[in-house]
Amino acid sequence: MAKTLTNERSLAGRQDDIARELALFRRMRLLEWGAAGVAVLAGLLWKSAGSGGWGLLIFGAFLAFLALGHEARRRENEQEYTDMQGMRGAKEDVARLLDDKLANDHFVLNDLHLKVGREKCWIDHLVVAPSGMFVINTLNWSGKIIGDTAKQAYTWKIRSPGGKIRPARNPVGRVQRERRILCNWLKGTSLIWENVYGLVVLAHPEAELAVTNAERRVMTPEQAVTFINDFCFEKPVLSNAEVEKLAQGLNRQSGGAG
């Protein structure tokens, strides 16, 4: 079993923010629609009595317009909350798998915030081992994933079980950027080596990989664990003490929150 130093926290924080906003929208919902209804009803009564009422009708329509806008925002927030819940679950599943299946001389840092100079990134999972370091970007895409790791921008496609296709950015570019920032951070230590690997993990159980040049780059969670464990048979590049020093140093740089 590996040693896990940090757990996922950024998505949890964002979910808490969305939950508070949704609670506010729910309280405002009754107030806004109730006030709009009262204003429109009062305007209609005044108008039927021949006393004008246009001002109240306009005010009621304005309140209804605001309420509709907040309804749209509420639906967007609910969808984002649901999507984030799935993404958070996928990352936590990968984190548990790494913790359970890697050897006890491996350190795992989840949701690692790394800043070097003006550049910063969030690394979903980082494994620090005697054989090297593994930067993992976890995605919760479902359906058939079609793409080529050698091509950039929105050249990938995700085909849902229903046949709907949507474009997707090549995630290998992101994990390579995270790897580069990590390597720049390593230049500030006395422990520099070239065994730093960037992996994209498609964690959804219904993800079907149809990716060209995916070897050693794009894989399932189980394949990622096997990939990392296979390096245990090679000559170590770091001692256990050096592994722990690096992992603890990165943990402190990220704030040391677990």
Image (spheres, grey):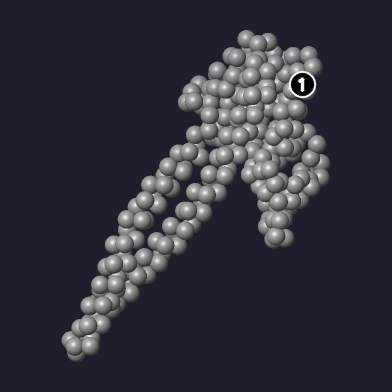
* Residue 93: x %, y % from top left: 61, 34
Residue furthest to the bottom in view is: 50
Which residue is depicted at the point 39% across and 61% down? 70
- Please say whether residue 17 is visible from this viewpoint: yes
Residue 247, quarter of picture:
top right
* Residue 10: x %, y % from top left: 50, 37
- Please say whether residue 192 is visible from this viewpoint: no
Disc 1 target residue: 231
Which residue is depicted at the point 69% across and 34% down? 221
Residue 198, quarter of picture:
top right
* Closer-to-camera residue (253/22): 22
* Residue 56: x %, y % from top left: 24, 77
The answer to whether residue 110 is left or right of residue 34 is right
* Closer-to-camera residue (195/124): 124
The answer to whether residue 129 is left or right of residue 48 is right
Is residue 186 positioned above or below 137 on the image? above
The number of numbered discs placed on residues in the rendered structure image is 1
The answer to whether residue 62 is left or right of residue 106 is left
Q: Quadrant of the N terminus?
A: top right
* Residue 51: x %, y % from top left: 18, 86
Element carrying mark 1: helix
* Closer-to-camera residue (130/87): 87
Is residue 161 positioned above or below 196 on the image? below
Give the residue type that dot 1 points to.
Phe
